Image (cartoon, rainbow, N blue to C red):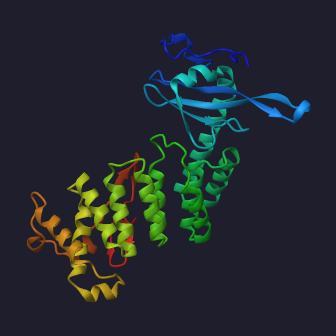
Amino acid sequence: MSNAGRKLDLGDEPEEHTSSVSGHDYLSGAGHVRCAFSTTKNVKMGMGVNSRTHESIIYWFVEQVGEETYLGRKLNTRNVPEGDSEPIPKHRLINEFTPQLAYYEEVVAPAMEELEEILEQGDEFREDGRLYSAEMEYGRALSVEERNVRALFGLGLIFSERKELQRTRELLVELVDVKAAFDGKNQHLFNEFGIALRKAELFTEAAVYYRRGLDFVTDDENLYYNLARAHYESGDWSGCLEALIMSHRLNPGMPLARNLFKLIVGLSEDERLLIQYDKPPVPPEVASRARQLLAVEKGRLPLDESPLGWKEISDTAQGRARSGGRSLDVGSRVNMDRFGDD
């Protein structure tokens, strides 16, 4: 490769004419590094007098994500990044990594673009309800990158939609441990998959995925609300209230959160409904806290004075919220109420 011996001087401002090779940027629009690199490693083979040293070359896709922050993923045999990201200090990138500009331009960038097109086609088929075609596209993506996050999530959504709970659970085990970098486009998948799991009545699993999403996005009131809903479904009142309070703090005017506060209070006051809808008793401290939050809402009437009684929630509480750049259904059917189902 023609650039194998070239070192990238990260201390200098790159000249404009060196920022691309035949059309593909190895620098992002913000002037950040985005390119294929290589490192070498000496591997000793054999024993004693028959031993010899072999130089192994490892190829990487490296992206600059901060002023002096770089993340690298190894390139697989299909020339696309695979596996978890590794942080690479600036001094190590300068001293140990060699940019492979021609390889990036001629091989890596086209392979990554082709994979993106396959994933987009799979997403389009899934959103159109063409589940078999979507499954085929996600399978193609996984043949290129074995643990591609979007493809795995897509399959999980399909299996959940088709009520194939065993296949859904098998994907859960694989997905929950994925540590691949999320670039601002994919975090919403945890929320979307959580919604699908909740609709499949896998409430504990849904809560796991909402919490996983909150590892990446900590200020999303919709994720916290959905986590509260999953805990409500499973009868975890403390978990429900904790998540609901976080949602309320981030967006005090969110109608769905207020409705769930009211539902908690209403169930705490009517034991017959708890039995009817198979819910455990609401702890007094949970009901009291929910009642307090309703009473002190700025500009709103206390619960007892509200013209909307909690029993009317099922007729009025509907909603859709946006998370991770997409418009998402933040609710699904809850035994006695309807919170925004399509």
Taking depth in this image into account, of 337 and 14 the one nearest to the observer is 14
Taking the image as shown, residue 222 lies to the left or right of residue 99, namely left
Left or right for 48, reference 258: right
From the viewer's perspective, is residue 315 above or below residue 143?
A: below
For the residue pair 37 and 265, the one nearer the viewer reads as 37
Residue 85 position by quadrant: top right
The answer to whether 201 appears left or right of 314 in the picture is: right
Q: Nearer the viewer, residue 258 or 99?
A: 99
What residue is shown at x 45% (from left), y 69% (from top)? 204
The quarter of the image holding the N terminus is top right
Among the 4 quarters of the image, the one containing residue 109 = top right
Query: Left or right: where does residue 35 sit relative to residue 317?
Result: right
**Relative image position of residue 195 (x, y in whole percent):** 44, 62
* Residue 244 x, y percent position in the rendering: 28, 62
Q: Quadrant of residue 161?
A: bottom right
Residue lying furthest right: 50
From this view, report whether residue 74 is shown above or below residue 175. above
Quarter of the C terminus within the rendering? bottom left
Residue 130 visible within the image:
no
> In the figure, 157 relative to 188: above or below?
below
- The residue shown at (21%, 77%) is 284
**Residue 62 x/y as whole percent:** 57, 30
**Residue at 64 percent of width and 38 percent of height:** 114
Q: How many marks?
A: 0
Q: Does any portion of residue 114 appear in the rendered image?
A: yes
Residue 235 place in picture, x, y as percent: 36, 76
